[in-house]
Amino acid sequence: MGSIGLDIDEVLSTTRNVRKRLDLERPVEREVVEECLDLALQAPNGSNQQTWEWMLIDDPDKRKLIADINRDALAHFLEVIEKKPDILSSRDIGRNERMDQIGGSVLYLIEVMERVPVLVIPMHRGKMEGKNVFYQASMWGSIIPAAWSFMLALRSRGLGSALTTLHLWKEQEVAEALGIPFKEYTQAGLFPVAYTKGLDFKSAQRRPAADVMHWNKW
């Protein structure tokens, strides 16, 4: 599928995390996902090492397996929150006015994930346990730009996704289920990929740059 005719500013300002508006009935052609990934791999990465690998899952049984692990990860996460509730509160700095609405859409996606046509897991080579900030920033900075470019490419072609991370509570189980060398690669998220119901996405609720910028000093 070709471009849906958005200019670059429209793509940048209307690429959203899409959950409830993913079309679970319309098949997604492998060719369009591969085309988007080709574009994503043009993203900058540390020293041009290209340490990324990408797992694309369209087999129904494997999608169901990953969806089940994702639900187990949610149960584990809820147990962690119950024991240490400050994990969530420490992340909320009062800039999001739609937390309840977002929470509902997250739960919806968890419930229907096996029905999403394609699941995509970006990975980078190496593990970060005990690594210093320089190493961590270099590794994340070599996969996140490509992940975002992938979302932009999807949006420009009428598809949507969301960068989810819940399954990382069970990262090793996912690795074993898909044959990913767990000791060699770090998973950076999980993209559910589908065509979207409608194309009329809008800019998000964001504070203006003037509220968060600091020229030369805090």
Image (cartoon, rainbow, N blue to C red):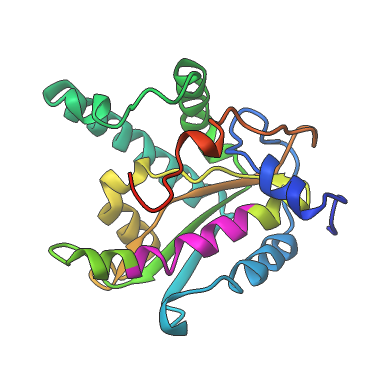
Magenta region includes residue 99: no
- Residue 169 left/right relative to 154: left
**Residue 125 x/y as whole percent:** 34, 74
- Residue name at image x 34 percent, y 54 percent: 174
Q: Main secondary structure of the magenta part?
A: helix
Q: Quadrant of the N terminus?
A: bottom right
Asked whether 179 or 4 is in front, the reply is 4
- Residue name at image x 80 percent, y 37 percent: 199
Asked whether 190 or 132 is in front, the reply is 132
Q: Quadrant of the C terminus?
A: top left
- Residue 20 left/right relative to 156: left
Residue most toward the top?
A: 100
Residue most toward the front?
A: 216
Residue stretch rendered in magenta on the structure: 138-151
Magenta region includes residue 139: yes
Asked whether 174 or 21 is in front, the reply is 21
Query: Looking at the image, can residue 105 be seen?
Result: yes
Establish if 95 lies above or below 12: above
- Residue name at image x 34 percent, y 68 percent: 139
**Residue 64 x/y as whole percent:** 48, 43
Establish if 93 lies above or below 54: above
**Residue 108 x/y as whole percent:** 52, 25
